[in-house]
Image (cartoon, rainbow, N blue to C red):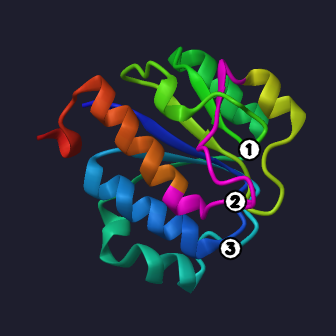
Amino acid sequence: MQPPIRIALYQPDIPGNTGTILRMAACLGLSVDIIEPAGFDMSDRALKRAGMDYLEMATLTRHVSWDAFRDWQAGEGQRLLLFTTRSDRPYTNFQYQAGDILLFGRESAGAPEIVHQAAEAELNITMRPQARSLNLAICTAMAAGEALRQINLPSAGA
């Protein structure tokens, strides 16, 4: 069964965030794509600790590069939606579809211009003006929750 949405992480930096995202995705029946290189060893203990025993339930696809990910995505025909602080479009004012890929940039640097150019839409989680950023795992949970709510599909294949 195809997951209702996918979470893609562009070169993630922090194993704890990635582990938390994998745990959330496993619990909700979502897939996670990691676009390498990651800023940590993917077998790192911190990743396993954050994901706990849920890592065995997670559907994880590793892509060796941005180009490899784009080749895969082109074959799948799924929309690529980038979450970025550079956008003024609130993520809650967007019409999600089953099969969408919710893409998030690096914790330390966001996403490069080539990633922005590839996205079909750029979305933002609006914050107070004096706030710089939210934790990546929190952002993915907020985005996944809104997308699942809109497409009205049960999570976890229920």
The quadrant of the rendering that contains the N terminus is top left
Amino acid marked by disc 3:
Asp
User: Height in image: 120 above or below 145?
Assistant: above
Residue labelled with disc 3: 41
The picture places residue 20, in percent across and down from the top left corner, at 46, 68
The picture places residue 88, in percent across and down from the top left corner, at 71, 31
Is residue 85 rendered to the left or right of residue 60? right
Residue labelled with disc 1: 85
Region in magenta: 119-138
For the point 88% across and 33% down, which residue is it?
113
Q: Residues within 10 Å of mark 2 (few under 14, many from 20)?
A: some
Q: Mark 3 against mark 1, which lies toward the viewer?
A: 1
Residue 128 image-quadrant placement? bottom right
Q: Does residue 31 show up?
A: yes
Ranked by sequence position, the earlier of labels 3 and 2 is 3
**Tag 3, which secondary structure?**
loop
For the point 37% across and 64% down, which residue is it?
23
Amino acid marked by disc 2:
Ser
Is residue 22 rendered to the left or right of residue 28? right
Amino acid marked by disc 1:
Thr
Residue 106 image-quadrant placement? bottom right
In whole angstroms, how far apart are the C-alphas of marks 3 and 1? Answer: 27 Å
Residue labelled with disc 2: 133
